[in-house]
């Protein structure tokens, strides 16, 4: 069940990924606007310091929500492409960490003055975005299926768990009561 919560076992097609990303952007814009309005009501704009913004629980909660929602959408789309999100997502995160460290260590390689990343990291992010948006699904997209519905098993071939259970009980892998 946890695999479906984080989207590791669910699948999401190209159009659904794009529409879900747009919907997430709209929701995050509304959340950021609500947080900004709440902060402006309680303090004057000249008294708000940037270091106070990182300690605001509403902003931290919004960042965590956005990170988890983005992680889930990307994991579902990566699964639909046919790649394994358990391998792709950590590799992408590791590459972004190495990119950030390289931009801080070698400022000449950084894209801007803030040393947040290099051109290589930007190209990897662009390639991942284009792949998630335009790469075709592993199966035909002509037939829409529910992304939270497990794929149908082939009737002719029993699953590995059925075979293990049959070996343990010294019986047949196919049920005989049908």
Image (spheres, rainbow, N blue to C red):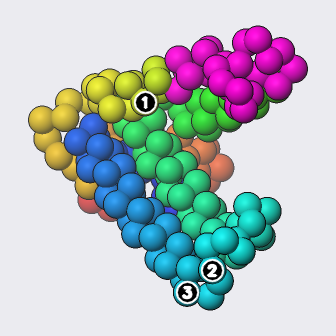
Query: In the rendered image, is residue 12 in sight?
Result: yes
Between the residue at mark 1 and the residue at mark 3, the CA separation in whole angstroms equals: 37 Å
Is 62 drawn above or below residue 79 in the view shown?
A: below
Q: Nearer the viewer, residue 54 or 140?
A: 54
Most extreme residue toward the bottom, as rendered? 42
Most extreme residue toward the top, as rendered? 108
Callout in the foreground (1, 2): 2
Q: Nearer the viewer, residue 102 or 15?
A: 102
Residue 129: mark: 1
Most extreme residue toward the front, as rendered? 46
Location of residue 5 in the rendering, given as x and y in whole percent from the top left corner: 51, 62
Contact flag, marks 2 and 3 (Cβ < 8 Å): no
**Element type at marker 3?**
helix
Residue at position x 73%, y 12% from top? 109
Location of residue 39 in the rendering, given as x and y in whole percent from the top left corner: 59, 79
Residue at position x 19%, y 35% from top? 141
114 magenta-colored: yes
- Name the quadrant containing residue 14: top left
Between the residue at mark 1 and the residue at mark 2, the CA separation in whole angstroms equals: 39 Å
Residue 44: mark: 2
**Element type at marker 1?**
helix
**Element type at marker 2?**
loop
Q: Which residues are magenta?
A: 103-125
Which residue is labeled 3 in the image? Answer: 41
Which label's residue is closer to the chain start, 1 or 3?
Answer: 3
């Amino acid at each position: 069940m946890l695999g479906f919560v984080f989207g590791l076992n669910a699948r999401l097609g190209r159009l659904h990924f794009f529409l879900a990303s747009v919907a997430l952007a709209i929701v995050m814009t509304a959340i950021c606007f609500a947080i900004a309005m709440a902060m402006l009501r309680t303090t004057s704009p000249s008294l708000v310091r940037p270091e106070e913004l990182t300690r605001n629980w509403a902003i931290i909660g919004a960042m965590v929500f956005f990170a988890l929602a983005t992680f889930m959408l990307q994991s579902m789309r990566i699964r639909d492409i046919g790649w394994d999100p358990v391998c792709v997502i950590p590799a992408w995160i590791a590459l972004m960490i190495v990119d950030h460290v390289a931009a801080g260590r070698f400022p000449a390689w950084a894209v801007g003055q803030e040393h947040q990343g290099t051109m290589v990291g930007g190209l990897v992010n662009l390639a991942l975005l284009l792949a998630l948006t335009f790469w075709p699904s592993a199966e035909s997209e002509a037939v829409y299926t529910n992304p939270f519905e497990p794929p149908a098993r082939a009737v002719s071939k029993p699953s590995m768990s059925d075979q293990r259970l049959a070996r343990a009980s010294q019986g047949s892998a196919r049920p005989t009561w049908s």
